[in-house]
Amino acid sequence: MKTTKRFLIYPLVLIGLVLILSSCKKKEEATSAKITDKDGNDYTSVTIGTQVWMVENLKTTKLNDGTALVNATDVTSWLNLSTNPGYCWYNYDEATYKTLYGALYNWYAVGTGKLCPTGWHVPDNSEWLVLENFLGGTNNAGGKLKETGTTHWQSPNTGATNEYGFTALPGGFRYDWGSAFWPIGISGWWWSATEPSAWDLSSGNTELGASILPEKAGASVRCLKN
């Protein structure tokens, strides 16, 4: 009888293992599924706690319904955007900055609710807070989000571990006035869907902070899965 029980138990264990592995595979597929914007740019994603975030900054020049955003190519055209949804590349240099840092959008582009690919959205303040709290609060979250080293972040890039693969980069931002850009390497700024808030990381500390930016400023965007 003991022998019979042993052979009955083993198939049940094997079935359980198969179900677990199948479940894990489905989770991996959901997280690594291809994400493409209206320009054909591809993105990857990472799961952090209960949220799924894009790993790269958004670089689309169109809303997800195909509507083109206004591309500001110099100081005058940026100032002339007024309340029109628009974007620019850092220092108006697409060739150098697009691939790594993405575009800098004004808040009016975020406010359309159609900036991210279908099935994704710009996170609001409550969703940024979920991320912050999962990573240990204001004083610790930033270090866990930043890319490590000083290839892109200015030294000392304090406390950077990138332990969840978010790989935040210091893309700076564009002021709403004049020709000035905040220098790349020092900090990164990402819009919230809560007008007109942005969340920022700095090379000099491990904080994830919320700030108020003028709607006519330009900042990066990270999309969150619906």
Image (cartoon, rainbow, N blue to C red):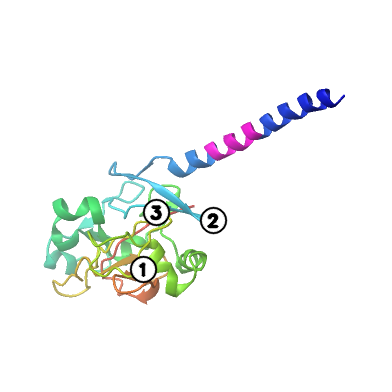
Residue at image x 82%, y 27%? 5
- Of the two numbered discs 3 and 1 in the rendering, the one whose residue sits closer to the viewer: 1
Mark carried by residue 50 = 2
Near-viewer residue (161 or 73): 161
What secondary structure is marked by label 3? loop
Left or right, 93 with respect to 208, comes to left
Q: Is residue 93 visible?
A: yes
Query: In whole angstroms, how far apart are the C-alphas of marks 3 and 2?
Result: 15 Å
Residue depicted at 38% across the width and 48% down the height: 117
Q: Is residue 18 magenta?
A: yes
Residue 180 belongs to magenta span? no
Q: Which quarter of the figure is the N terminus placed in?
A: top right
Circle on res. 165:
3
Secondary structure beneath disc 1?
loop
Place of residue 25 in the rendered image (x, y in percent of width and height, measured from the top left): 53, 37
Q: Residues within 10 Å of mark 3 (few under 14, many from 20)?
A: some
Q: Which residue is mark 1?
A: 159
Query: Is label 2 in a helix, a strand or a loop?
Result: loop
Residue range in magenta is 17-25
Horizontal arrangement in the rendering, residue 11 relative to residue 130 (left or right)? right
The amino acid beneath tag 1 is Gly
